Amino acid sequence: MNQIFYLVGTATKETLAMVFFSTACSLVLGFPLGVLLCVTDSVSGISPKPVANQILSRIVNVLRSFPFIILMILLFPLSRLIVGTSIGTKAAIVPLSIAAAPFVARIIETSLKEVDPGVIQAAKAMGSTNMQIILKVLIPESMPSLVSGITLTIINLIGYSAMAGAIGGGGLGDLAIRYGYQRFRTDIMVCAVIVILVLVELIQLAGTAISNKMMKRR
């Protein structure tokens, strides 16, 4: 029993580390992309650039359509270049971040487009620059939706991190496969699955609570 607690505890820490750092990196990569997709939109953008928007949109769509397992294998050289290895928790953060970035970009774009056009027009009428509109209107007004989107991203990354365990990514997925499936330890596999379900539920509850609190303050 102590061994199970130790293995599950260690794997949970690895999963949390992967999800935390990959979420941070995917936001750094995806947030600017989402803003650009919104701002350059030919219909509702504050600075329409149809050609640039279409090119960027196609790139995001291609990256989103890649199966994660294949993407992770393709990014082995990049992981090795950045962190010095292609297996383990650190290595998994690279493909997790890149896989989540286009997803984040679409979430950010959708959230920003939900802002009332009248608010944007009022900001323009007061002489606000595009950057001021982005920082002081679009982002603040869309915060509840952004929080919900980021919550969804974190939950997806937990699922991705479990898949990463299939090819040496570490974490709960790796534990369930190596110790649970390959060594016929059903108890370990069940524990790993339960922990994943609990993590998802806790994150969803926290994200919903924060988003609702923001909505009430508006």
Image (spheres, rainbow, N blue to C red):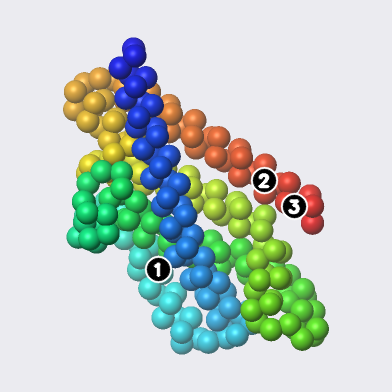
Secondary structure of the residue carrying tag 2 is helix
Q: Residues within 10 Å of mark 3 (few under 14, many from 20)?
A: some
Rounded to the nearest angstrom, the CA distance separating label 1 from label 2 is 29 Å
Q: Which residue is mark 1?
A: 61
Callout 3, which amino acid? Met
Q: Residue at x 30, y 17 (%)?
A: 3
- The quadrant where residue 79 appears: bottom left
Residue ID at (24%, 26%): 179
Q: Nearer the viewer, mark 1 or mark 2?
A: 2
The reply to whether the C-beta atoms of the residues labelled 1 and 2 are less than 8 Å apart is no
Q: Measured from the top left, where is residue 64 in percent x and y?
A: 38, 62
Residue at 73%, 82% in the rendered image: 128
Chain-order first, disc 1 or disc 2: 1
Crowd rating for badge 2 (residues with CA inside 10 Å; few <14, some 14–19, many 20+): some
Against 103, is 117 above or below? below
Q: CA distance from mark 3 to mark 1?
A: 30 Å
Disc 1 marks which amino acid?
A: Asn
Residue that carries the numbered disc 2 in the rendered image: 210
Q: Earlier in the sequence, mark 3 or mark 1?
A: 1
Q: CA distance from mark 2 to mark 3?
A: 9 Å
Q: x and y percent of residue 72 in the render? A: 26, 54
Q: Residue furthest top?
A: 1
Res. 176 mark:
none
Tell me if residue 159 can be seen.
no
Q: Nearer the viewer, residue 13 or 178?
A: 13
Q: Position of residue 82 (x, y in %)?
A: 27, 59
Q: Secondary structure at mark 3?
A: helix
User: Label 3: which residue?
Assistant: 215
51 and 137: which is toward the camera: 137
Q: How many marks?
A: 3
Eye-nearest disc, 3 or 1: 3
